[in-house]
Image (spheres, rainbow, N blue to C red):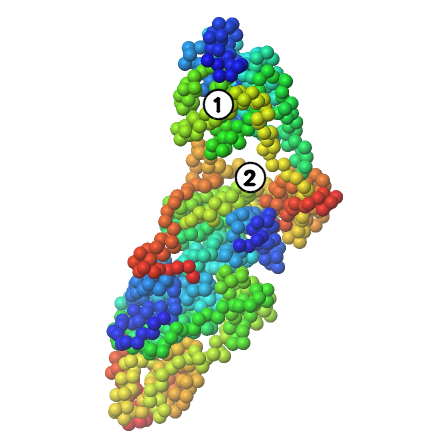
Amino acid sequence: MDTRTELPFEIRDYLRLDRMPHFLCPGCGHGIALRALLNAVHELGIDRDDLAVVSGIGCSGRLSAYIDANTVHATHGRPLAFATGLKLARPDLHVVVITGDGDCLAIGGNHLIHACRRNLDLTCLMLNNEVYGMTGGQASPTTAAARYTTTTPLGNHEPVFDACKLAEGAGASFVGREVTLQAPALKNLIREAIAHPGFAFVEVMSDCTEIYGRKNELGSSPEMVLRQKHDVRPESYGNAVERPFRPGPWRTGVLAKNERAEFGAAYRAHCRAHHGGGPGDV
Amino acid sequence: MNEAAHAIDPAAVAAAPRPTNVLVVGVGGQGVIMVSKVLARLAQRHDLEIKQSEVHGMAKRGGSVFSHVRFGPQVWAPTIPVGEADVLVALEWAEGLRWLPYVDPERGTFIADTKRIVPPFGCTDRRRGATLAYPGTAVADVVGLVPHAYALDAEGMASELGNPRVANTLLLGVLSTVLDFGVGEWREVLAEFVPAGTVETNLAAIETGRAWALDVAARGVLPLAAAPARAPAVDVPTGAVRLDIEAAWCKGCDICVKFCPELCLRLNAERVVELTDPAACTGCRICEWLCPDLALAVRNVASPAEAPA
Amino acid sequence: MNAVVRPRNLQGNRACALAAIEAGCRFYGGYPITPSSEIAECMAAELPRVDGVFVQMEDEIASMGAVVGASIGGVKAMTATSGPGFSLKQENLGYAAAAEVPCVIVNVMRGGPSTGLPTRPAQGDVMQARWGTHGDHPVIVLTPASVMEIHAETRRAFELAERYRVPVVLLYDEVLGHLVETVAAPADAGASATRRFASGPADAYQPYRPGADGIPDMARPGDGYRTHTTGLIHDEDGFPTQAPARVGAVMARLLGKLDAHRDAIERAECVDCGDAEVVVVAYGITARAAARAVAEARARGIRAGLFRPITLWPFAERAFAAATRGARRIVVAELNAGQLALEIERLAGRERVGRLNRLDGEPLAPAAVLAAIADAAGATGER
């Protein structure tokens, strides 16, 4: 056990300091999510050597490079596929996937639904900023109605995905959503997701301040973060009107949780039952 | 038969012109209303007239809550006048002190949990080491202010039973030795009001409270002395804090500046954050949590000397 | 692993799967596609017996991604597919090449393009196997021509992949995949090369600093190195760089890393090439027809020879040059419109090279190759 986990959380212990400062734009919500993740990892007492972070392509995909752990910056949309192989081969590792709304729901949508179905012990953080930021601000599957992006010059006319409902419908055994504004709650949610033995999907409502925010005149970085307050409906207030798609209120908190057989353990048990032996930890 | 020397005989109550007055006080979420409902139902079973008058709702969770319960052959006014409460049941120490003048100076009984819940306005000075705005009155200080008093660590005793939330029922157990309803009645009525899954724990709690009260009465010890004074149940940060800024990481998004409750951050001419008033920083960590650039860190330091002047 | 010592009748695809397990493969990510599915089926049955993991992924892309992920985890990993699936795997195959993640990809070729001829043999993926993913990249492609050789080359594929940290493509066709032949692997086959994992102090470790052989040691997660793996062009520390001098240097090493090991990687068979006037170049299923055609040509007095690349890429240039030094004519026989012929023309000159192609879903028969040899011999003025 890494002794640093017994000390107060010190983010520098979990960062590759020689890579800092990170490349994210001023006010980008992804940085807040990164801190929440690292704080959760610390509280769980996970040794950095036993942590693997697999990310995709896009602004969210770059976060893995700053984390002092075993990190993989995979191909666009495929981090869940990479992570599935990694976790099945190495059940001893804690595997966290960082992905974005385009990476996870568009090009990687098939991998998401099957990861949910399989219920392998992975934690998937989908940082939703409603836009393809890295490529210059194109519309994504979560771009809200009427929002302007470089590919919706007349305002977005496409319906959006409710990622959490998608994940729950596909069978994810843990589904949660939180806003970056509620950073301590986000930390707690991520902590619970990582501790959950099965596939855990967490949608983080993040802000793209410099591209999406400017294009849609959503205000300064502080104003964008504060705006989240008005768009959120914590799960405990279950009597509010149900509105499935953005703009809000978005239900936040733990939205679904059940105990379903974890894929890797079930596979190993299944093999052992048939062959006496069976795949063990490598 | 009375189980304690100062218990109230229902027959005397029936003859007396004045109803029995029980004031139940505490803070939101503790179960003040439950205690008063149990009491009202007991009285109802004896065909007594009941008036139960409570303030809640405004209080929400953590705010001040009180409930006047009056019962007798005839009850006119809904609230108890000052100095006429036969029993004051306090689920929280300071709330009990607040209502002490209501206790009948001749024959009143004060039953209090020594639990302390510091309200938000008791923490207006958010700096480390600040003193809490909470009454310093100790348990011993109450001796002599009321004719009879029981002060106990009800929450601690309830925790030992497996559920700190049954502290209110434990106080009911103490109260049951003061009012002369039958033991079985208390148990029956209690079972009606508590959630189905908690009946067993609640019955154990009322028994524990009764046993404790009867024991201190039988041994003649001062009930107050039997109760350990409890430390405030609030985590008051001690030591000093220091806000460290990694200026090279800051991209000047302004989030910390706008969110700082103490208004002690600003962006300098280079749009890099700086701390304008170190003494004002309370170490609340809002800036640290929300800094997208991971440039802010609140660190505990051993002494104020290590904190920036 | 137990070496296979007693002869047994094996289907080509099954021989491939069993050899992979013998080579230490403990992860298979697959997706069903004709005519490769028997490999997945065999792995699903056999891997649990050896503490391995088989997973059928949601698509071809995911199966390749899972293989790369498992290999990053330090486990020998493989997938198998055919034409359309091979196309889908190219992106992550390129990732493996760029990030130098060892893995083995079997492509049991079928007629193309597109869905093509799923149950018919072809050799149309020769160039895709070499250049299928975008950008310049190192790759090794092996083309066995018998079930016995599928067994041997599958084992060698793992050896090469692990030793040189490169994706290795095993390329054969529908006929070989479904062919049953007697296999008797040598008793001394032994386990194939194990990966060279990083050791020594973590502070000094650079994930892409080459060893003496030009190949960097690979860090295993959990060993304390905490490296970053990316498909972006990266410096020796593993992190992205765009500095032209660094990009140039790391690309030069990446693209040249196999050059120093060409002798170990290249493998080819020469039959009667010493005095051959006509050399047939053929690989895989076509080489079997070509071998018989060469024998028949010899019986008829034509000095014919066969050059059969077993390692297709990097192409065995020196062996080829030696085998064709005296040849007047070279005939490239293949089940495509002329793909390896391009490489042969580059090496031997267009004037010396003739082509024999077939694209109708049927293999080339010895008679057709013999006829081509005879034509070529006529052109050389023999007989």
Q: Amino acid at mark 2?
A: Arg
Of residues B148 and B43, which is closer to you in this image?
B148
Q: Residues within 10 Å of mark 2 (few under 14, many from 20)?
A: some
Q: Where's the C terminus of chain C, which quadrant?
A: bottom left
Looking at the picture, how far across and down is residue A130, in whole percent? 49, 47
Q: Chain of mark 2?
A: A
Q: Chain of mark 1?
A: B
Q: Which residue is mark 1?
A: B210
Mark 1 or mark 2, whichever is nearer to me: 1
Of residues C199 and B14, which is closer to you in this image?
B14
Looking at the picture, how far across and down is residue C75, in whole percent? 43, 64
As drawn, A140 above or below C201: above
As drawn, B260 above or below A122: above
- Residue drawn at 48 percent across, 19 percent down: B176
Q: Where's the N terminus of chain C, which quadrant?
A: bottom left
How far is disc 1 from disc 2 in space, using C-alphas?
53 Å
Check disc 2 and report its element: helix, strand or loop. helix
Could one spot residue C76 in this view of the protein?
yes
Q: How many marks?
A: 2
The single residue placed furthest to the front in the displayed view is B219
Of residues A149 and A231, which is closer to you in this image?
A231
Q: Which residue is mark 2?
A: A227
Check disc 1 and report its element: helix, strand or loop. helix
- Residue drawn at 51 percent across, 52 percent down: A46
